[in-house]
Amino acid sequence: MKKYVIIGNGTAAAGCIEGIRSTDAEGSITVISAEKYPVYCRPLISYYLEKKTDLKRMNYRADSFYTDNHADVRYGVSALAINTDEKEISLDNGETVPYDALCVCTGSAPFIPPMQGLDTVQNKFPFMTIDDTLALEKAVTPESRVLIIGAGLIGLKCAEGLHGRAQQITVCDLAPRVLSSILDDKCAAMMQKHLEANGIRFLLGTSAKEFIGNSAVMQSGETVEFDVLVLAVGVRANTAIVRNAGGNVSRGILVDDVCRTSLPDVYAAGDCTEYHDISSNSVKVMALMPNAYMQGRTAGINMAGGAVLFDNAIPMNSIGFFGLHCHTAGSQPEGCEMYEESDDSHIKRLFVKDDRLTGFMLLGHMHRTGIYTALIRNRTPLSEVDFARLKIEPQLAAMGEAYRNKVLKGVV
Amino acid sequence: MKRIYVKEQWCLGCRLCEYNCAFANSGMTDMAKALRGKQIYPRIQVETEANGVTFAVSCRHCNDPICVKSCIAGALSKKDGVIEIDHEKCVGCLTCVLVCPYGAVIEDGSGVAQKCELCMKNSCGAPACVKGCPNNAIVYEER
Amino acid sequence: MIPLEGQVRIPSGCAVSAMISRDGRRMNGESVIQSMVPMHDRSNGLGGGFAAYGIYPEYKDFYALHIFFNDRQCRSECMTLLREYFEIVQDEHIKVRKIPQITDEPIIRRVFVSPMQSVLRHLQIDEKELVVRVVNRINAELDGSYVFSCGKNMGAFKAVGFPEDVGRYYRLEEYEAYCWTAHGRYPTNTPGWWGGAHPFCMLDYSIVHNGEISSYDANRRFIEMYGYKCTLQTDTEVIAYIADYLLRRQGLTLEETAAVIAAPFWSTIDKMPEAEKQIYTYLRNAFPSMLVTGPFSIILGFEGGLMALNDRLKLRSMVVGEQGDMVYIASEEAAIRVMAPDIQNIWSPAGGEPVIVRVKEGAF
Amino acid sequence: MNFYPEFEVVRNDSRCIRCQVCERQCANEVHWYDEDGKFMLADESKCVNCQRCVTLCPTRALKIVKSDCRLRENANYSDQTIKEVYRQAETGGVLLSSMGNPNPLPVYWDKILINASQVTNPPIDPLREPMETRVFLGKKPERITRNPDGILDTKLAPQLTLSMPVMFSAMSYGSISYNAHASLARAAEALGIYYNTGEGGLHEDFYQYGKNTIVQVASGRFGVHKDYLEAGAAIEIKMGQGAKPGIGGHLPGTKAVGDVSKTRMIPEGSDAISPAPHHDIYSIEDLRQLVFSLKEATEYRLPVIVKVAAVHNIAAIASGIARSGADIIAIDGFRGGTGAAPTRIRDNVGIPIELALAAVDKRLRDEGIRNNVSIVCGGSVRSAADVVKAIALGADACYIATAACLAMGCHLCRSCHTGKCNWGIATQRPDLVKRLNPDIGSQRLINLMDAWRHEIKELMGGMGINSIEALRGNRLMLRGVGLTEKELEILGISHAGE
């Protein structure tokens, strides 16, 4: 009987459990969960603040998930080290856990750049976990003025979540636009305008230079008074445990297309990894929930002796604020062409290079965008489809009869 | 398992399937009451090829469903071959819309995702689009 | 006014009975008359009759015409016609016994005739065909004359009345036949007419029949194409013509004829071995209009034998008994038990399954 | 001259959900959606009352009603008559119409009643007893023959074997669509009956249904070649058609497109005009020659049908045909349908099939030649009861076409000649043709025939008849009601009560 150990208890871990069990019903599975909660998906925390979900519904899987899958979860303990020679890991409670196959699903942690006077701030919170969220929820009152450092996905979702709970929400970011990692100027401007129309205040191209108690002095010289500070500058992959064991690590743990690390019988999946993006043909950290699950599942199946690949990863994001949705996927490589259409309420930007759709940014109108995503993921030659029609609207009708017959007439 | 398949050779592009779908999932007993004066968000959609060929697209209930894998809320799941959506859990992030290669998961007009669940959850009993197709262009069968 | 026979179609229910000696032993009519007694209620007094085979051995080469005449005038007309085609060998009264149950009798004559060879040559037909044509003509055209029997060495005896009375009336105990058939009639559409009683005869074929066939007009309209005139509009008549057409004119065997009249169902035919299937399919295909449907049990008498046949669904009762060289057939077992009280072997033939009894070759 | 439209589109706005199905489905472009007002509009002058929109409207928001806007009443000059005069005054043209004669002329089927058994013989329950409907069509032997061993020689003139006495009569590929033909062919095969190519040739896709196909040879000889003749189970020489006796056919060039022109062997887009007579048949002896040349061409393997319209001296014509070597006579009554016919001819020429059939059956029997041929009658056989009555009058089988079209969806709007059949039957427009899915079309035809077969069996069972041949010509099973002595005499039946 094989011994499987998973470090971490996020969606990659859940994928790993399901992957193992799809292949091996017998082996033991041990999950090392630093958090005290059964698997949930971290992006849900903003929806929790918005009251679109609650702690119960946030559970990623049914209550019986671990028992159904015969997985032993050790809540509240962290793995400290991997001993590849002995094939065991050591825990912060002094235990060691032997493994035959190990999957590292350690995720990421907030990255907080050194800021002067940060220690003088009383109410400061990262926004990553349920515990962060519960603490933040407790601290925020209808009179609160909230300053959020970071206008990325986390910061803005936090802003949306707190909307209506606080008196004033200000978001600042060193970048000159919101969602700088996924949106270009034009799209970001539309999104920013929409957020501003919903009462979020922005200070962009600037960040806090110094904190003095409840006031932040911005690089621009402005001072922002606040009651609650949210630190959402960014995240870093949790790679230490692999790096310390001698595994190859760059910005994330390097994995191949079966999610193997450079260490024997050690796999990794999720936000802690760095892997190949086919849209840009580069290796990068793509801390995305769908990819995390798919990596976890891939790792699990391969750990249990199966053979599947996860070799078509692309970055993609579905995010929305106050009813304005935004879908992005892929990349905009050097020298790509852009097809654009836009009006007051929506923007569509498609990026094409070498007869391939490499990426897109869509704001406002989110209808059947997965058809575009599939074009990127499948690296479909655009000369084989009716791209002139596809540009206007994603549709299978423009994908050619052969494709249509394949996907609509048979089992897919 | 039985799935919905389209026979485009017989599709007339009348779009009755879309309206039958919208009605079946409206929870109402009168179609006029359910749909009159309303924008519909059917879970099956008729497409038209440049040469005039029409066909309806709805969830393929894939063997390896990327929407289920991608759902951040664990709201999508596959049970007995049917990909279902738990509207209690769905937070409306629309990741499923972003990943479905067939464009079969769609937003319901209120920010929540919806998709064909083979009319298993409504009072129709069998897929309304299939029942209502006047030319057997949509069939529900084993393949 | 109640229409006369021949003006309307006459359905009827009935009783039939028959006995035959395979050895060709000749028996008087007492037994077969008695057999009709227990089936009294199957008749209503509007007709009874018998056919007897082998009764005129001394005249066996001549056609025995049994004729009803309404009056002397009719008789003389008829005899004039007969003389055009036949030598009259003998012309006599049929002896009867006056009994109160039988009244209103016509003139009843027996005429033995022999076809004139010159006529046959002239018309280029055989003698049987000549007899058929002349008899048909008399029956259709000569009002008041009716030939009710025209075979060789056989004869029919019939009247309005209950069959046991008719048998007595005709003194059948004085005739000796190797084969007897009997009939009691229960017509529902006629005041009763002597000519309409059964058996119905054509040449040596005699038919007694119990039933009401539903195919009547299909059969009639078809058979009339071949020169037959269904003047009586009875089932018996049309079945007799069909039998004559198939047996004599087409030369089908009795079995083949049965397969036309009471054809096996397609479901049965389709399961037959190929050779057999081809024949049965052919017969149904070639003679579709001679399929008889609706309830019937018939006994077809002919020179040297008889055939009993039920409709394909066996909608009428008919039982057969066998003892020694004797075969008995009747609507009811009770009738057989009168003829042969100790009989052991009694069965009920299936619908459409012909029972064919032949007298030993040379014994008649 | 403008008339108020014949039909009005009545839309119940409280039920209309603006789904626009009516708009998408109307080939006559009656309906459209007004973006500004967000409602549906209709141009009723284009409506032919085919009921496509009514049928497909999911909320029953639509009905088509006959307009009550009428010219001043005149029992002599009806509204229709006056408008026809106007139309001809305007165009100078022959009026065209389609399908069968719609005028209120006598329907004898409806004045004939069927018998049932009571007491003296038993009705037969078709659910419990075998009830046979198999029919053979073809010449019957005059004499049996025997092989030297005494076994019956079972060789017969070529026959058609039908599981029930109904066939689909001639409708050409061209006048009706590929899918309509596919439906008919598939249904005929499944049912064990026959369909008829009409004068349009046989599409290569349908050669596979050859054993259930009757191939027609008509005066234009369109689509006729050796393979075609050999492909079918029987050959029908079409001398005339009940809907338009005495004239030929006309397939407009607009319908002679693609496979239609190929199958007919005529240039694409050219009018296919069948002459009124066969130009090699000016007399009965010429017909005999064609019958035998077709038999020669097919090595006497196939029965030959001669189809004629029911006209005044039909009995004599049939007698001639019965002696021409033909195996089967098909008689087509004046209410039979057509894809296009001059209105005056459709409505005024020919005689009712019931009388024609009765006269022909009687004549052939009188002449003793009824066995030479089988008789198939068509020209408005609308139900199982009509079939039973036809068989009892003397037919061997019936041809149906209008009823078959109805089964496939036809709503008898009588606009076939426009080529815009909204039901995908009488059209060659691909978008309309596809509206008839042969899966559905054939199944509906099968259903219809199954239903009729059940009904025929019920009616037969009631009469105490358990095989169809015992019904054929069994006129005693029929009685007339409200018919004159003469009509009864011709039909050869008694009046009810007699």
Image (spheres, coloured by chain):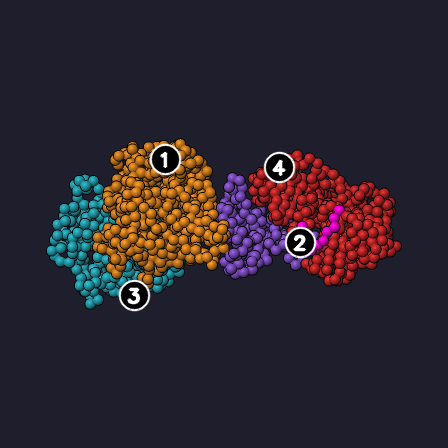
Chain colours: A red, B purple, C cyan, D orange
Query: For the magenta stretch, what is the residue range?
Result: A193-205
**At numbered mark 3, what does the secondary structure look like: helix, strand or loop?**
helix
Residue at the image point whose x is 25% and y is 51% from the top: D77
Res A99 seen here: no
Callouts 2 and 1 on one subunit: no
Dot 4: element: helix
Amino acid, disc 2: Ala
Any magenta on residue A196?
yes
Left or right of C100 in this view: C344: right
Task: Check disc 1 and report the residue beneath it.
Answer: D271
- Residue type pointed to by label 1: Asp
**Residue furthest toward the front?**
A221
| Separation of marks 4 and 2 at Cα, in angstroms | 38 Å
Q: Mark 3 to mark 2: distance in Å?
A: 111 Å
Q: Tell me the subunit letter for badge 4.
A: A
Quarter where residue D344 is shown: top left
Distance of label 3 from label 4 (alpha carbons): 99 Å
For marks 2 and 1, give the CA distance. Answer: 69 Å
Amino acid type assigned to the residue bearing label 3 in the image: His
Task: Name the amino acid type tagged 4.
Answer: Leu
Instruction: Report the chain holding disc 1.
Output: D
User: In this image, A163 relative to C186: left or right?
Assistant: right
| Residue at the disc numbered 2 | A197
Residue hosting label 3: C40
Q: What residue is shown at x 19% (from left), y 63% (from top)?
A: C1
Query: In the displayed structure, would residue A278 be above or below residue A169?
Result: above
Q: Which is more toward the observer, D10 or A211?
A: A211
Residue that label 4 marks: A382
* Marks 1 and 4, how far apart at CA: 45 Å
| Residue D429 percent location from the top left of the image | 44, 41
